[in-house]
Image: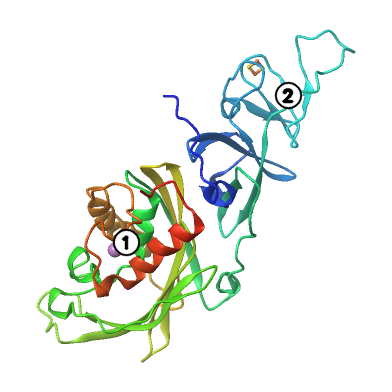
């Protein structure tokens, strides 16, 4: 179905993770960013993204193929180089000039942190440098992507939220008997919002255990772009830590694709697949709630919904989105 491109002065100039890097091969793939169809593909020179539309008759370039580093449209075989320039129109008599307008719209595209990233506007900033990815003590694993029929802003808000851990993830990440949150302070800077050192008690999970036994984990959470956030969860008693980077692709205003990297510095003997499976389960619990929320879009007016003291992070997030002028996924 035809989807109109969504206008957003911030998100269209942001980098968005659109695909798992390990899965992108030469064969072009179609993704959607802010309602815009985007074709991505890989050549020997790197990864590339075009508007998924051939200027000739509007066929999808992602349904075409790559031949000698050239993207070929599936309809009449026009060929585009990696800058988007059309270099061959097979039906045109040899020696004739290619019309100058015969171009594919190329977008900024790169590969980093295990994902393919695309910006459909002018990148307003570089992707942040996360030294954790190079830390040999940690083992990053890509999880997802997860399709969520909800606004990306609702996913980020959920990621910053502590008070749901004891209910939505009961038995996995908390327990209702330990739902009271400590006081915490949200620090807001121009480019990010974060909290540091929030202790959350997590009882032992297995059945039959005394729930007063458990671990007090120390959390840090940070939202560093409107739709990108990360957290660290550490056990100070033994130095074991887990960090998660989560970034949300706004497919449309009410549908998103969530990419996540989970990394740990412990239990290397445990199968990676188990960690991914655990994350899938936790995320699914969140998604099932997020998809039911009304209004679907995040209200930036703090009079809508009931904002409580325990929602300080979410309140700061909404204020920040308003300041930045983020439109998509908000009302
Ligand atoms: Fe692409 Fe005609 S539509 S070559
Ligand atoms: Co959750």
Residue 51 visible here: yes
Report if the beta carbon of the residue with label 2 is closer than 8 angstroms to ligand 1: no
Q: Quadrant of ligand 2?
A: bottom left
Q: Is residue 145 above or below residue 317?
A: above
Q: Is residue 244 above or below residue 294?
A: below
Q: Position of residue 315 (x, y in %)?
A: 34, 67
| Name of the residue lying farthest toward the left | 208
Disc 2, SS: strand
Q: Position of residue 278 (x, y in %)?
A: 31, 62
The residue identified by callout 2 is 79
Quarter of the image where one finds residue 166: bottom left
The residue identified by callout 1 is 158
Q: Position of residue 225 (x, y in %)?
A: 51, 61
Quarter of the image where one finds residue 310: bottom left
Q: Is residue 263 above or below residue 93?
A: below
Q: Is residue 250 above or below residue 272?
A: above
Number of residues whose C-alpha sits closer than 10 Å to that of mark 1, classed few (under 14), some (14–19) or many (20 or more): some
Which residue sits at x=38%, y=50%? 330
Q: Nearer the viewer, residue 92 or 296?
A: 296
Which residue sits at x=39%, y=48%? 329
Q: Position of residue 244 (x, y in %)?
A: 43, 67
Q: How is the image coloured?
A: rainbow
Q: CA distance from mark 1 to mark 2?
A: 44 Å
Which residue sits at x=52%, y=49%? 11
The quarter of the picture where the N terminus appears is top left
Report if the beta carbon of the residue with label 1 is closer than 8 angstroms to ligand 2: yes
Q: Is residue 47 left or right of residue 143?
A: right
Q: Which mark is residue 174?
A: none
Which badge, 1 or 2, comes first in the chain's sequence?
2
Disc 1, SS: helix
């Amino acid at each position: 179905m035809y989807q109109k491109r969504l206008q957003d002065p911030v998100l269209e100039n942001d980098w968005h993770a659109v695909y798992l890097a390990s899965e992108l091969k030469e064969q072009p793939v179609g993704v959607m960013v802010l309602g815009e169809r985007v074709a991505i593909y890989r050549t020997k020179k790197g990864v590339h993204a075009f508007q998924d539309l051939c200027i000739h008759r509007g066929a999808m370039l992602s349904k075409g193929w790559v031949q000698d580093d050239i993207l070929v449209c599936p309809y009449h075989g026009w060929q585009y180089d990696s800058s988007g320039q059309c270099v061959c129109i097979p039906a045109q008599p040899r020696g004739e000039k290619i019309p100058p307008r015969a171009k594919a719209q190329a977008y900024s595209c790169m590969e980093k942190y295990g994902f393919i990233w695309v910006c459909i506007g002018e990148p307003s900033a570089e992707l942040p440098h996360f030294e954790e990815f190079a830390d040999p003590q940690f083992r990053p694993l890509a999880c997802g992507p997860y399709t969520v029929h909800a606004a990306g802003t609702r996913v980020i808000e959920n990621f910053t939220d502590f008070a749901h851990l004891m209910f939505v993830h009961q038995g996995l990440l908390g327990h209702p008997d330990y739902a009271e949150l400590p006081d915490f302070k949200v620090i807001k800077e121009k480019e990010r919002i974060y909290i540091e050192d929030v202790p959350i008690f997590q009882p032992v999970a297995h059945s039959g255990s005394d729930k007063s036994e458990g671990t007090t984990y120390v959390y840090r959470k940070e939202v560093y772009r409107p739709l990108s956030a990360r957290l660290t969860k550490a056990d100070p008693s033994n130095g074991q830590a887990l960090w998660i980077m989560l970034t949300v692709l706004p497919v449309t205003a009410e549908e998103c694709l969530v990419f996540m990297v989970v990394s740990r510095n412990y239990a290397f003997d445990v199968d990676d697949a188990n960690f991914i499976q655990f994350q899938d389960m936790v995320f699914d619990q969140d998604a099932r709630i997020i998809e039911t929320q009304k209004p679907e879009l995040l209200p930036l007016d703090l009079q809508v919904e009931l904002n409580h003291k325990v929602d300080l992070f979410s309140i700061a997030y909404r204020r920040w989105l308003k300041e930045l002028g983020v439109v998509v996924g908000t009302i």
